[in-house]
Image: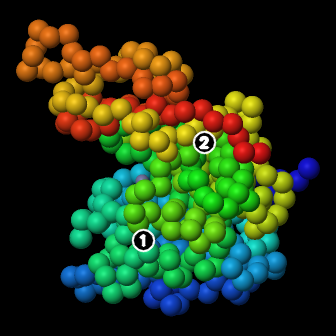
Amino acid sequence: MTQPSAARATQTANPTVKRAIVPITGLDVDSPGRRDYFVSFEHPTLWGSYLVPVTVFVGPEATPGQGLVAIGSTHGNECEGPVGIKRLLQDITQADVRGRIIMIPTLNVAAFAAGTRDTPEDGANLNRVFPGDPKGTITERFADFIQTRIFPHVHVVLDLHSATNAFDFALVSSFHYVADKVQQRKMEETARGFGTRFVMVYQNDTPGLLTSTAERMGKITIGTELGWGCTVCPEGVSMGMQGVLTAAVQHGQLRGNVPPNRHYRREEQILIDNSDHGCYVHATRAGLYEPRVNVGDLVAPNDLIGVLHDFDAIDAPGEEIRAPHRGYILCQVRARVMRGQVLSVVSVPKPWME
Ligand SMILES: [Zn+2]
C-alpha cells in the first residue's frame, strides 16, 4: 500500500520558492507544474498592494472545472487552517498531483495581519459578502477573486475555520443540507475524512457565506471549526491537514491511498444537526455563564447544562439553563454575555446518509 508522499510528510523548508506577484488575471491554473504566487490587490489607501499567497499544483490528469481548493483565514483570527495549509505547501509533492490543487493559506491577509475576524479597512466579514464585487471594498474584492478566478476551476471547496473567542467549541467538519442527494452524500463522506468526532450540519440562512455560495454551484463544499480562542490547537491542525489530503485523494486530485486516520475512528464519528433554531440556547438577561457540563457531552431533555449568574443580584442563586432536547453540547459561551447572546448549542444526533 503506497501512501501519497504528502502522508510521508517531512517538514523541509523550501527557501527556493520565489513567489511571482500577479494581478487576479495572472493566475495560470491550467499548465502542468507547481506555481507559487502572491496575488495582488490594490490597497485602498497606501501606494501598495495586499499580497495573497496562492499555490497552484497542476498534474497530468487535470481537467477543466475539476480540482480542489483549500482556504485558510477567511476570518483573520482563526489559526489552525492557515498553519495546516502552510505545512501542506511543503508536504505535497508535484509528482503526486494528478489533477488540480489550489492552496490559499491566508485569504484575508488584511484581517490575518491584524489578528481580527473582520477586515480592519472596511469592517466587513469576508464570510458574509460572497459573491463579492470586483469594484467593491477590499473584502468584497477578495470574495470576487474566489468567486470568479478559483471556483470555476475546482469542484471541491474546503474552507477551514475555527471558532475564535466567543465559545469553547467542539472540533467539527461541517456542511449544509442541499437538494442534490448525490452532492450531499459526497459532502458527508468528505467531511468524515477530517477525522473529527462530530460532523455538523447547520442552518443555511446566513447570507453571503463562502461555503453556501460554493454549494449552490454544486461543489463538494466543507467547512470546519478546528479550534477556538485564537490559539493554535495541534489536533485541529492535524485534522485539517488530514482532511485536505484525504479529500484530494478521494476526489482524484492526488495519487496514492488516503492518509491513515490519526483521529476519531469511523465508528466513533457522530453526525449532529443544529440547523433548527431550537438548538440555540439564548440568554434572557446579561450575566456570567457557568457551564455545568462539558463540550461534547450528551445531555437529556431538561438536563441542567449551566447557570447564568447575575452579579447585580449577588444573593440570588442564578438562572438554571436546561437542555431543550436530547443532544450533544456543541459549544459553550466563554463567560460574560449580553441579553440575547447564545449560551450553548445542543446539537441533535442524526443517522448518516450513507
Ligand atoms: Zn471563521
Q: Is residue 48 above or below residue 98?
A: below
Q: Residue at x 36, y 53 (%)?
A: 77
Asked if disc 2 is less than 8 Å from ligand 1, the answer is no
* Residue that label 2 marks: 199
Whole-percent x, y for residue 308 in the image:
25, 22
Whole-percent x, y for residue 127 in the image:
40, 62
Q: Residues within 10 Å of mark 2 (few under 14, many from 20)?
A: many
Q: Residues within 10 Å of mark 1 (few under 14, many from 20)?
A: many
Answer with the quarter of the image where residue 349 lies: top right
Whole-percent x, y for residue 11 in the image:
64, 54
Task: Using the numbered discs, state the Cα–Cα distance from disc 1 to disc 2 in whole angstroms.
Answer: 24 Å
Q: Amino acid at mark 2?
A: Val
* Residue that label 1 marks: 130
Q: Residue at x 39, y 15 (%)?
A: 304
Q: Residue at x 58, y 65 (%)?
A: 215
Q: Secondary structure at mark 1?
A: loop
Asked if disc 1 is less than 8 Å from ligand 1, the answer is no
Q: Secondary structure at mark 2?
A: strand
In the orientation shown, which residue stands out farthest toward the bottom? 25
259 and 302: which one is in front?
Answer: 302
Q: Mark 1 or 2 closer to N-term? A: 1
Q: Is residue 286 visible?
A: yes
Q: Is residue 147 above or below residue 291?
A: below
